Image (spheres, grey):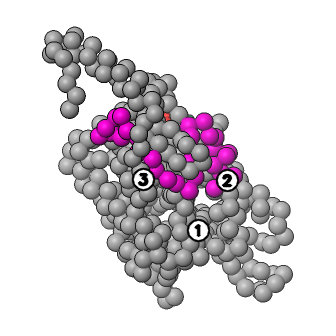
Amino acid sequence: MATAGNKIKVVCRIRPFLKTEKPDSAVSVEGDTVLRVTNPRDTTKDVKFNFDSCYGAKVGQDVIYKADVRPLVESVFSGMSATVFCYGVTGAGKTHTIQGTDTDPGIIPRALEHIFMHKQHDPLDYDIRVSYYEIYKEAVFDLFKPRDSAGGSGLPIREDASRKIFVAGLSEKRVTSYEQFDAMYQRACGNRRTASTKLNNHSSRSHAILTVQVQWKDTVGSGKTWCGRLHLIDLAGSEDNRRTENGRDRMAESSAINRSLFVLGQVVEALNTGASRIPYRDSKMTRILQDSLGGDSQGMMIVNVSPGEAFLQDTHNTLNFATKSREVVNKPVAHEVVEQRWSAVDRLQHHRGAGRAVRS
Ligand code: ADP
Ligand code: MG
């Protein structure tokens, strides 16, 4: 079992404003590690959050990949395990970061291209296998198989003779080229569970985990067989249930999502503070990943946030989850911004005949 060792790096990424959004200035990056956000309780103040790295809206996928992800991918060729999570509310840029688009590829295509490139230029004979599964309401479903093949309760989690945790019956597809991987992966993405919520039409309600296993026999040296694992994870949206106004089914999903994200947060915190007990067993995801979190493994959580004022409360919830280190600071340009904001409210109130706007 993994023990406390390497810390989980926590980095933040702000997505750019979408064409449909009003560009305001609720969030900004200071230096390379600090995110400055308007305090939702007092808009004359900002709150600063510290991260291992902090990426503004203009930073491209290639920069994040090279600086923070590539070393983790490379570590797999030393027989290590590495895990990258994207955490944030729906619409904050998790899928864009982990998966990306054809014209702006994210971590998964870049990592897989890197792995096949390494394989091509290395004399060792690497066996590369991928699994892709989702955890939905604490049940595990194979995304390489038709959705209903595992039944409602999903695939069981078991422990082998050496106490290693595995998902019984999960497919491990052998892949020999990037193109072969990509065709398989694209098909599997269509099997992901999505549902409409008030916040987003295609909200992801499950955690999607892509695991790449790189195994080889050290024919030049020890003769031993080595295996490295890389887990790339698009977490379910971390939004607050009360705002989504979901029905009963959605609420059941939401509480499972919130619970498993809460446990993930506890595991990250326990690893990062060197706690003696790491609560891996408290959720399916952390249980499955326990050999790849902590110990000699490397881990990184990318915290995705939206840039606008409309998401301010969500952004604060996200940042409070992701970092314990924060500081309230006076806002240098508060006066000007507050005036503009209040004159807009005044106009609205006047239009409705509700009299003067009163600050609460
Ligand atoms: P999530 O998976 O967290 O719900 P998405 O990744 O789907 O969010 O992002 C929401 C929208 O924002 C999408 O239209 C996506 O294309 C866009 N987007 C997110 N991050 C970026 C980025 N860094 N650059 C450009 N567009 C982005
Ligand atoms: Mg998504």
Q: Badge 1: few (under 14), some or many (20 or more) residues near its Cα, within 10 Å?
A: many
Q: Badge 2: few (under 14), some or many (20 or more) residues near its Cα, within 10 Å?
A: few
Residue 344 lies, in percent from the top left, at: 32, 17
- Is residue 168 visible to us here? no
Q: Residue at x 31, y 38 (%)?
A: 42
Q: Residue at x 29, y 52 (%)?
A: 254
Query: Relative to 253, is 289 above or below?
Result: below
Q: Badge 3: few (under 14), some or many (20 or more) residues near its Cα, within 10 Å?
A: some
Residue 322, by quadrant, is: bottom left
Reading the image, the residue beneath label 1 is: 298
Reading the image, the residue beneath label 2 is: 67
Reading the image, the residue beneath label 3 is: 326
Residue 43 on the magenta segment: yes
State the quadrant of the C terminus.
Answer: top left
How far separated are the C-alphas under marks 3 and 2?
A: 24 Å
- Is residue 316 visible to us here? yes
Q: Which mark is residue 5?
A: none
Amino acid type at circle 2 is Ala
How far separated are the C-alphas under marks 1 and 2?
A: 14 Å
The range drawn in magenta is 39-68
For residue 296, side relative to residue 151 (left or right): right
Q: Earlier in the sequence, mark 1 or mark 2?
A: 2
- Helix, strand or loop under label 1: strand
Residue 196 lies, in percent from the top left, at: 33, 39
Whether pointer 1 and pointer 2 mark residues with C-beta atoms closer than 8 Å, the reply is no
Query: Relative to 81, is 189 above or below?
Result: above
